[in-house]
Image (cartoon, rainbow, N blue to C red):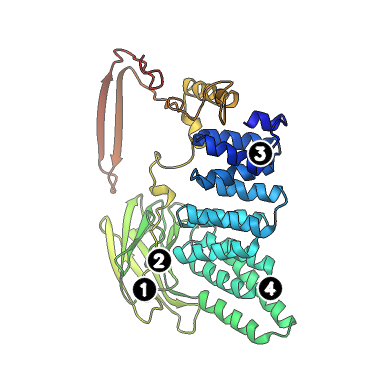
Amino acid sequence: MVASILDGEAGESPKATWKSFFAAHTPSPAALNRSTEKLHRKGRHDHVVELIRAALRVGLSRPWMYEVLGISLELSGAPQAEVERALLSRVDFVAADVPNLLLSGAYLNRLGAKRPALRLYQEAAQLDPNRAETYAVSLRLAQSLDDFEVIGWAAAGLMRTAWTDRGEALRKQAKDAVLIAVEQLQEADRNEEAEQLRSQFDRAASQDLVLRLDWSGDADLDLFVEEPSGTTCSHEVPITGGGGYLGHDGYGPDSDNSYELYVCPLAFDGLYTVRIRHVRGNVVGKRAKLRIVRFRGTEQETVRVIPIELIGPETPVLVAMSAGRRTAAIESKPRRSAAAIPDTQRGSIHQLVGRLSPEQLAAGNQFQVGMNNGGVAIGGGAVGGAAFNAVGYTPITTTLSQGATLQTQAIVSADRRYVRITAAPAFTQITGVDTFSFVSGGP
């Protein structure tokens, strides 16, 4: 079918062509994928649109179809409302979570549908109010639209959530955006709106509770803050449903890096249990300094500095909080930091290439060549090589060592007096190799 279209042999309209085809055939998802890609590369966007529409009508929907449909409609010159409707349909098909909403919003923004994109970003912020990136993209979009109400909302969101990676730069962007918006409102003689925007930003720029732990020496101290809601903020979970953020996870000997920072812009009333864990190294004088700031950035700001004597591996400190502005926990999943994610879960396949052997790299290159040479066309099965989306064409390369190996691990105690060594010898032998194909049904 695709070959006849590309050769100009299909006499019917694109809509009639694909309606007739799907009435007689039920292609596989891989075939749909390859045929759509071929038509797109040849610039037959009208056929891409009708192929996807016909597939959707017969129930052969896939998540990628709505994205490709929206882009193809844009390339074929369809009305903007039709493009927006196609991309918004993606939200109904996929899971309504933050990544999918942000992705759909990015597509809409790219195609010029800024208002619908902004609505998706705001919906994403409602699902997970702790994500600073949602407010960051909303702020840039609102500035391009001169939407002062959304500018105030997004800037306030950044001031309350941008406390982890790149937090300082994001908060500066929020402050600059509000200053520009206030000037524009004042120039337009909208002084009341300008004052409301400034007041909203000032409230968001304050924090109910800030804890900073400082020390000197080459040690590594970790801060664990147990919040009244039952959540714990630490380097493993830097953002919690209780509104806490671990703004900095430091270690010695650099004095500029020897501190831990916990920020809770909207805090619960109750007791915060602060646990200071001595991970490794030496602290000068075996003492640290805990700085407690309540209602920072307001007229009620109070500061208290407590000297902490580090006697054991962990030192607890109780911090009482009253008149906090938080009344309910945030219903979002706490996210772990990258440091807490095992290597087997972290990164993409491209980041793992550096750990592959030459044999594994060669196998991967051969597989890629097979993908590029092979193809699947609707109605024609495999063409020009292997159908790489079929069974048996997803290679999983495993390196097997042969002989004796020894793995050891050494752990130094906190007082540097003892070293615990664990040794794990292993003896392996490859006795034989069998090859079996699920496609052919035998070896």
- Taking the view exactly as shown, the residue that stands out farthest to the right is 187
* Residue 236 drawn above or below residue 27: below
Earlier residue among tags 3 and 1: 3
Cα–Cα gap, marks 2 and 1: 13 Å
Please state the horizontal and vertical placement of residue 30, each as a whole percent of the image.
51, 34
Task: Kindly report which numbered mark, 2 or 3, lies closer to the viewer in this rendering.
Answer: 3
Question: Quick one: label 3, few (<14), some, or many (20+) residues within 10 Å?
Answer: some
- The secondary element bearing badge 4 is classed as helix
User: Which residue was labeled with disc 2?
Assistant: 244
Name the image quarter holding residue 312.
bottom left
Q: Which residue type carries mark 1?
A: Ala
Give the alpha-carbon distance from disc 3 to disc 1, as whole Å.
50 Å
Camera sees residue 129: no
Q: Are marks 3 and 4 in contact (CB under 8 Å)?
A: no
| Mark 1, residue position | 328
Residue 274 horizontal side relative to residue 102, left or right: left
Q: Residues within 10 Å of mark 4 (few under 14, many from 20)?
A: few
Q: CA distance from mark 2 to mark 3?
A: 47 Å
What type is the residue that disc 4 sits on? Answer: Ile
- Specify the amino acid type for callout 2: Gly
Q: Is residue 254 left or right of residue 236?
A: right
Give percent across and percent down for residue 245.
Answer: 43, 63
Label 2 neighbourhood size at 10 Å, few (<14), some (14-19), many (20+)? many
Residue drawn at 30 percent across, 31 percent down: 408
Tell me which numbered mark, 2 or 4, is placed earlier along the sequence.
4
Q: Which mark is residue 180?
A: 4
To which residue does mark 3 refer?
40
Image depth: mark 4 or mark 1 in front? 1
